[in-house]
Every structure is written in C-alpha cells, then in structure tokens.
Image (cartoon, coloured by chain):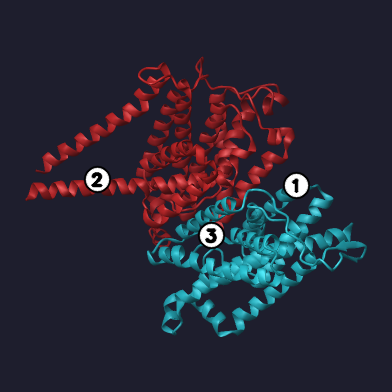
Chain colours: A red, B cyan
C-alpha cells in the first residue's frame, strides 16, 4: 500500500512539474511568437518582474523566514543593487562619466550584488545585537538613508530625474534587448538562486539559521555562534536582493528613487508573509500573486496599498505559514482522506 | 535668525515629542513597539480638522471628541488584532508586522475617506496675534505645542509612577502572569494603554496641525523622526522621549538653516544609525539588546 501511495504522490509531483514547465516555458513562448494568444510583450515583462521580485523575496526569506530576523529595509539593498549596477555600466553616468570606462552589465550586476552584500554586513554588525523591534527600526533607518542618498546627490545619481537608458545585458554577444530574451535569462538566474538557496538551507549553515530562529539561548548552548550566523544571513540576503535590484535596472533600463521607497520594503515583506516564509516555493508564490494582483487591480489603484496591508494582516492572523502552508495543509488533508479510504 | 531657528526647532521637537511619548507609553505598558502611532496621529488630526475646520464646532469640543474617538479606535485595534495575535502565541516579530500592516491600512483608509491633498488647519487662536520674542515672531500655536508636550510628559510620568493604574500598567508589561495573580486585569490594562496612546497621538496631531497642515503623509513625515527621538532619548522613558525629540528637532532645524535643507533628513537618519550602533540604550539607558 505504501508503494502504491508513493507512486500516486510522484504522479502528483510529475503533474506539478508538467504544469510548471507549461507555465514557465510554453506560455511565454506562445506569448512571444503569437501562438494561440496574440503576441503580448507586456505579459512577458510582467513575468520578468515576478521573477525579479521572487529573487528579492527569496533573499529576504533567508533572513526573515529561516533566521527569524526582521528587515524592513530591503528596499535599501534593492536600491544599492540597481544604482550600483547602473552606475558601473552606464556610459554617461558614474564610471562612464568619470573615467570613461564601462563594465559589462553581466559583471556589474555581480559587483553590485557584492556591494549590497558589503552594506548588509555593515548593517548587520550593530543589528545582530539588537532586540527585534529595534532591528526593524534600524533597517528602516538604513533604507531611508539609502533613499535619501540617491535622491540628494544629483551629481552622481541624477536625483529625482533618475537614470535612463541603462544598457541591456550582453550575454556572450547576445544582447538581451527584448522581454522574451530577458525572461529566458531570468529563468536561469532564478533556478540558480533556488539551487543555491536549497544548498544553503540544507547545509550546516541553514540548520544553524533555523536554530537561531527557534531559540537563541538553546542554539548558543549547542555551540552555534549566533552573531556569526546572523551576519551570514544578512550578507546572503543582501546579496540576493542586490542581484534582483541590478536585474531590475537592466530590465526596465530606467531607475529613479521613487521605486525604492519604504513602501517597497513593505511589499517585499507582504509577498513573503503572504506566500509563506521558510521554504522554497512560498516567496515565489507570493511574488507571483501579489504582482499579478497589482496588475489586475489596476482600476483600483487607490486601494492598492490598502489591499496589501489587508493581505498582510489577514495572513499574519490566519495564515502564519502563508499560502504555501495552506496549500500543503490541503494536500496533506487530501492525502489523509485517501489513506483512510484505502484503509477502510 | 538664531532665535527664529531656535524656536522653530523647539516647536518641531515638541511635535516629535508628542509621538515619541506615545511610543514610550506603549513600550512601557506592553513591551511592544507600535508602528501605527504616527498614522493614528494623522487620523486624529484629520478628525480634528473635520470637527473644527469643516463643521465649525468649538475647538475644545472638537479636540475632546476626536480624542475620545481615537481612544476607542486604539482600544478596538488592540482588542481585535494585537490581543488575538498574542493569545495565539505569535512571535514578537509578527506583532511588529501586524502594526506595520495596520499602519499601511490606516494611511490608505484616510486617503479614501478624506483625500490625498494637503489641507490647512484653521488657526486656533483667532484673537491673539503672533508675538515677538527676541526679534522673532512666534505663532501662539507654536507656544501651545511646547506647553502641551511638556505638560503631557510630566502628567504621563506622574500617571505611570504615582497612580494605581499606572503601576498596574507597568506591572502587566513586566510579567503578565504575576500581574494577573496580583488581581490586575492585564488585558483590560493593556487595551486602555493603547487607547491612551491613541488619544495622545490625536492630541499631538491636532496641536501640530496648525503649524504643519494635515495630509495623509503627516504620519510618515513625523513617524521616523519621532522614532529616532525615542531611541536617542532612551526607548520607553517619558523624559527621554521629550529630551530626544527636542534634540532631534533642534538638530534638524539648525542643520537646515546652517548646512542646507537638502541634507537635514540625511543628518538626522545618519544620527539615528550612529546612535543605534554606539549607544542604542539612549540617553536614559533603555533595554535594547537581544539576550
């Protein structure tokens, strides 16, 4: 019987994979080449945005979901990633303006993420010592400072006018100049990020993260260096969010300080809490649903933030494990029911 | 110039102080940080504006009514959300998140009820003309803000330390079980605290509205800096809240006047981060370190 059940679940897994491949590969291709649907570049653009948010939210998940440290300042890392990559690769700002050299976006994205990671470590040095509420305050102040920095030094960042015509990513001679190409690239990046994340989470480091989240005293007693792992979590989280910010800059090719305000940090957290934290799929689910709902509710633009707030409150109150937790519960329930059926 | 800037700084500081007092009160009474406080101030200011400005009721009645309504709103928020979460055994982090969600909701609800424009609040003292102190003209509303903030601080301190209810509040923050055994109705105490904090925010909002105007962003505009003042003063301490707020207000106006208004926010936030790194316990040592 056990074998039979296993066979059934793996069939379910296969179905899930098939649906996933269909959603992620077949539909964008159909949208791009105008098969069945009429060609629609905007929808592919939206899927790119979902991917980018999924990376950022996965990064936040390492910090919030696994290590239990709150951050309301991820817009700051996102902003650092975007601006750093833009300034490094743009011919008429930053490096291009001062030294006349530009760095290929594919490298500048990596450098920008490293810079974000550096800031993450810097922020984590005082942050690891603070109680939860003060941590949230410190991270807000950090993001606010980053926002003020990019908006009040117009000589470097062009202030509120923003930086336009950021170069496309050039991947070994292939210019990712349309949304479909960018999407395929992002798909690879997301898979890479998820593989890295799984490996981190399943390793000793990940188990230490969870130990810190569950009980700091006990973790300390078991020889886990709490401070070290908190710093690691901040660094990794900032790195992922930095990558996603840089990718955003090269996708949209225009950035201005308005995209990196406090509300963005709240949106990241809403995605994470609503999707479900502390697992692989939750952040992606959250990013996908919140981003697409944002588009569908375009007509109710004024209500947008109200709805986010409501969603966050509802998920905190009734779905502490998020949508992913709910889905798993439902699957478990269905499985239990089936088992009972077989038993009787 | 100097006197002008000084008085401007004091008024601004007292504005932050009214909010910082609310943060400290809730922190002392329930041990939680409340991110809705600035938005309660904004909603309170809007209520005051509706009663006093739009409907033309007498100022005292408008203020009292707005404060009573905000008191009820604060209690309702605690009853419906915070208490549910605490009873479910949610971690602190989720309670902080819930208050953030509530603050987003309040802000946008206010935008829908009123609108997103900047409203000007009618002057409270129509008969008293602005008077001069050391060559600088001062609006009576500015003096009112200073007087109200200072007296609120003293009254709150006396209330917390000298009255039976204040002692009950502090006891329930320190140890819920022990307070319960001593015959304190812990939940009622906490919910009244939230009510008082909301009413205080409303008072602050109505008092500062003639100086700053009312808009849905009033809370965000003041919120972070009052947090900074509460932290610099020593979180949870009434005197710390006001001292920190005056400090931040003075630093902000002086740097705006002598360094440049573009950098004033930058300086204040950098100061907050520096304070968090080197002296997070603030001037009046608060407990901020994780175990």
**Can the viewer see residue A74 in this picture?**
no
Q: CA distance from mark 1 to mark 3?
A: 27 Å
Which residue is at 81% across, 48% downward?
B259
Q: Quadrant of the N terminus of chain A?
A: top left
Q: Are marks 2 and 1 on the same chain?
A: no
Quarter-of-image position of residue B135 = bottom right
Q: Position of residue A17 (x, y in %)?
A: 28, 31
Identified at 13% across, 48% down, the residue is A339
- Residue situated in front as seen by the camera: B263 or A196: B263
Identify which residue is drawn at 62% across, 70% down: B65
Of residue B240 and residue A254, the one placed in the foreground of this image is A254
Residue corresponding to mark 3: A133
Q: Which label sits on residue A251?
A: none
Does residue A226 lie above or below A121 as drawn? below
SS category of the residue bearing label 1:
helix
| Residue B166 in picture, x, y percent from top left | 56, 80
The label on residue B263 is 1
Whether residue A195 sits left or right of residue A333 in the image: it is right
B165 versus B98 height, above or below: below
Q: CA distance from mark 2 to mark 3?
A: 35 Å
From the image, tell me which residue sits under label 2.
Answer: A331
Q: Residue at x 53, y 66 (%)?
A: B73
Measured in 3D between alpha carbons, the distance from the residue under mark 2 to the one under mark 1, in whole angstroms, is 54 Å
Q: Classify residue B39 as left or right of residue A156.
A: left
Same chain shared by disc 2 and disc 3: yes
The chain containing the residue under callout 3 comes to A
């Amino acid at each position: 019987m056990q074998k039979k059940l296993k066979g059934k679940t793996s069939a379910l897994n296969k179905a899930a994979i098939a649906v996933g491949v269909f959603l992620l590969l077949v539909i964008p291709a159909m949208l791009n080449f105008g098969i069945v649907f009429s060609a629609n570049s905007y929808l592919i653009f939206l899927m790119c945005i979902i991917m980018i948010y999924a990376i950022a939210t996965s990064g936040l998940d390492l910090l919030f979901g696994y290590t239990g440290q709150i951050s309301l300042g991820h817009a700051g890392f996102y902003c650092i990633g975007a601006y750093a990559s833009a300034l490094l690769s743009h011919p008429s700002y930053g490096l291009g303006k001062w030294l006349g050299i530009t760095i290929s976006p594919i490298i500048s994205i990596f450098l920008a993420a490293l810079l974000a990671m550096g800031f993450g470590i810097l922020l984590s040095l005082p942050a690891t010592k603070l109680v939860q509420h003060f941590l949230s305050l410190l991270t807000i102040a950090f993001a606010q400072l980053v926002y003020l920095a990019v908006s009040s030094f117009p000589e470097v960042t062009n202030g509120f006018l923003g930086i336009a015509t950021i170069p496309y990513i050039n991947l070994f001679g292939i210019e990712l100049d349309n949304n479909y190409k960018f999407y395929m690239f992002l798909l690879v990046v997301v898979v890479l990020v998820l593989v890295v994340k799984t490996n981190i989470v399943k390793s000793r480091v990940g188990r230490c993260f969870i130990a810190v989240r569950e009980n700091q005293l006990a973790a300390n007693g078991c020889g886990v260096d709490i401070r070290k792992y908190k710093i690691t979590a901040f660094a990794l989280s900032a790195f992922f969010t930095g990558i996603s910010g840089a990718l955003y800059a090269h996708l949209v090719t225009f950035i201005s300080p308005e995209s990196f305000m406090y509300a963005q940090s709240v949106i990241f957290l809403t995605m994470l809490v609503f999707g479900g934290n502390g697992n692989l799929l939750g952040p992606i689910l959250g990013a996908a649903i919140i981003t697409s709902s944002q588009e569908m509710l375009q007509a109710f633009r004024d209500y947008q933030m109200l709805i986010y707030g409501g969603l966050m409150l509802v998920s905190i109150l009734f779905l502490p494990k998020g949508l992913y937790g709910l889905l798993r519960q439902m699957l478990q329930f269905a499985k239990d029911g089936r088992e009972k059926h077989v038993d009787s | 110039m100097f006197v002008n800037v000084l008085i401007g700084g004091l008024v601004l500081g007292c504005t932050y102080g009214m909010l910082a007092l609310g943060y400290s009160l809730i922190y002392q009474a329930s041990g939680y940080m409340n991110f809705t406080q600035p938005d309660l101030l904004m909603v309170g200011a809007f209520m005051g504006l509706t009663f006093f400005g739009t409907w033309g009721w007498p100022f005292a009645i408008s203020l009292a009514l707005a404060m009573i309504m905000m008191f009820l709103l604060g209690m309702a928020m605690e009853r419906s959300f915070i208490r549910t979460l605490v009873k479910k055994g949610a971690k602190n982090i989720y309670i902080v998140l819930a208050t953030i969600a509530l603050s987003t909701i309040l802000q946008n609800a206010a935008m829908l009820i009123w609108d997103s424009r900047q409203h000007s609040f009618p002057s409270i003292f129509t008969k008293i003309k602005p008077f001069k102190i050391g060559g600088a003209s001062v609006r009576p509303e500015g003096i009112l803000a200073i007087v109200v903030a200072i007296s609120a601080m003293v009254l709150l301190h006396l209330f917390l330390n000298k009255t039976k209810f204040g002692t009950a509040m502090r006891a329930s923050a320190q140890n819920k079980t022990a307070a319960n055994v001593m015959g304190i109705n812990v939940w009622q105490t906490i919910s009244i605290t939230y009510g008082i904090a909301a009413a205080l925010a409303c008072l602050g909002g109505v008092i500062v509205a003639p100086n700053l105007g009312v808009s849905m962003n009033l809370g965000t505009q003041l919120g972070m800096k009052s947090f900074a003042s509460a932290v610099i003063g020593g979180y949870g301490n009434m005197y710390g809240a006001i001292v920190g707020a005056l400090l931040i207000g003075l630093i902000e106006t002086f740097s705006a006047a002598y360094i440049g208004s573009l950098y004033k926010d930058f300086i204040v936030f950098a100061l907050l981060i520096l304070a968090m790194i080197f002296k997070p316990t603030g001037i009046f040592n608060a407990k901020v370190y994780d175990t």
